[in-house]
Amino acid sequence: MKKAGVLLDKGAVISKVDERVYGSFIEHMGRAVYGGIFEPGHPEADEQGFRKDVLSLINQLQVPIIRYPGGNMVSAYNWEDGTGPKEDRPRKLDLAWQVVETNQFGTNEFADFAKKAGSEVMMAVNLGTRGIDAARNLVEYCNHTGGSYWSDLRQAHGYPDPHQIKTWCLGNEMDGPWQIGQKTAEEYGRLAAETGKAMKQVDPSIELVTCGSSGAGMPTFPEWEAVTMEHTYEIADYVSLHQYFGNPDNDSQNYLASTMELERFIQTVTSVCDYLKAKKRSKKTMMLSFDEWNVWYHSSEQDKKLERWQTAPPQLEDRYNMEDALLVGGILITFLKHADRIKMACMAQLVNVIAPIVTENGGGSWKQTIYYPYMHASVFGRGVSLQAIVSSPAFDTKEFTDVPYVDTAVVWNEEKEELAVFLLNRHLEEDVLVRYSLKDFTGYQVTEHLVLEHDNLKMENTIGEQNVKPHRNGQSEWDGTELEVKANKASWNVVRLKLNS
Ligand code: AHR
């Protein structure tokens, strides 16, 4: 059996984990809203039309923040269309996704929904077809107490108290040619800075996310970050990163190594931020908001066949398998390793659209394979992220070299006296024995070892069958200072320890 070692010291802290790193995303597209979180008339719908079965699955994930309403959709969205009496709301063409938007769900409904989900809202403003005026009005509508046109309108719409939305995205993927109102870096930087300035004049307590590149593969990356942040560095608090993964060539070993690319992306964006900090002699450190990430490729072909101008068609409905769950685990580990800079991240998306939760219109709801590593990290990964010195055998793939078979992150919750060890074995044929040196944690005991694994890497879950789900029969031994974990081939592991009191 292969062997690996991990050295930890409780004084070697990367950073406190910002719980918002376990955020998610609901866009007005496909069946994310209509038929996903909102389905009036469904047997499980509450008085507002929110599906209680879906809320219960979201609650189990403990999602601290949800981005809304887009995504690409926001770049031609008039937020006013989704407010006020429902019978007066216009049906509009959503150009981004080539569908008809009924606007029966909008800002106030989402604020209510987020409250029921136990989440904060991350609101995106339209910097494609609109700009400063619509954005500052939306902040006034959502956050101003009353006594002004837009805040009084909110009250007239049945919301006497402000929604107090703290986090705002200055547009979405404005570098992308697919974006309505795509901008050059110079155009976007100026517009975002001036929009952000006005938004903060309405409510100085808000935080802003400036748009980074749509992905590391964009031809303008990382020049886009350098040019846009010349303008937005002082007004924004975070820069966004987006990245989607896939295994279209069916090379599982290469696919599972793709967190190496993620690692490079994070390091590059961090470097650009720090270059600007130095150049501007700024005291501020720009933090990262990885506000779109996931696996997205399974549905690409079927989406090409969809007819245009439907309402809530099944778009981007990827069905995830075992290997996707492993990659998601690896992504979450990578975020924890960068807890000092990544303060927010959103799994894109939450329901039906490239999502961990799937619903049937009028029917049930269920968990995809990727639900589990996401839930484990969110529920158990709260505390401080510890620096893990890992020595692991490594492999090469067609795209990556020196990829460690073992990837790990460890989170210590001092208050609860709990330790969570997240461990991925990306070896497809062999188990690996991983020895953690945990000399600072004498008195702790292993409380459970959760494992997600399946012999068939392509195995998926369905509405009736949870073929891929965690079990508690992981093998780990603890001698008081060292933890020996048997990481089965191609498995995601969570070993939890607690101080024996
Ligand atoms: O999440 C799906 C889409 O991916 C989003 O609308 C867009 O921002 C990204 O390209």
Image: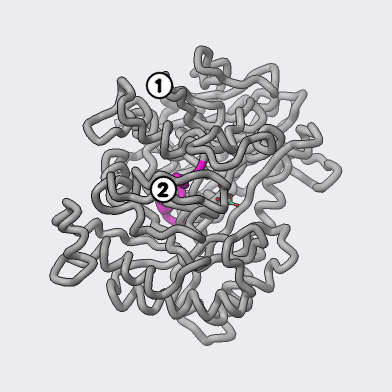
Is 463 situated above or below 113? above
Judge: label 1 CB < 8 Å from ligand 1: no
Residue located at (43% from left, 51% from top)? 69
Write the start and end of the magenta stretch as one range: 15-29
In front here: 72 or 441? 72
Task: Answer yes or no: is residue 83 visible.
Answer: yes
Q: Residue furthest top?
A: 464
Q: Are marks 1 and 2 in contact (CB under 8 Å)?
A: no
Using the image as rendered, state which of residue 161 and residue 304 is in the foreground.
304
Where's residue 374, x and y in %? 49, 36
Which residue occupies 81% across, 40% down? 395
Residue 91's tag is 2
Can residue 396 be found in the magenta stretch?
A: no
Q: Secondary structure at mark 2?
A: loop
Kind of residue sitting beneath label 2: Arg
x, y (%) of residue 392? 72, 40
Crowding near pointer 1: few (<14 within 10 Å), some, many (20+)?
some
**Which residue is disc 1 drawn over?**
362
Residue 26 belongs to magenta span: yes
- Closer to the eye: label 1 or 2: 2
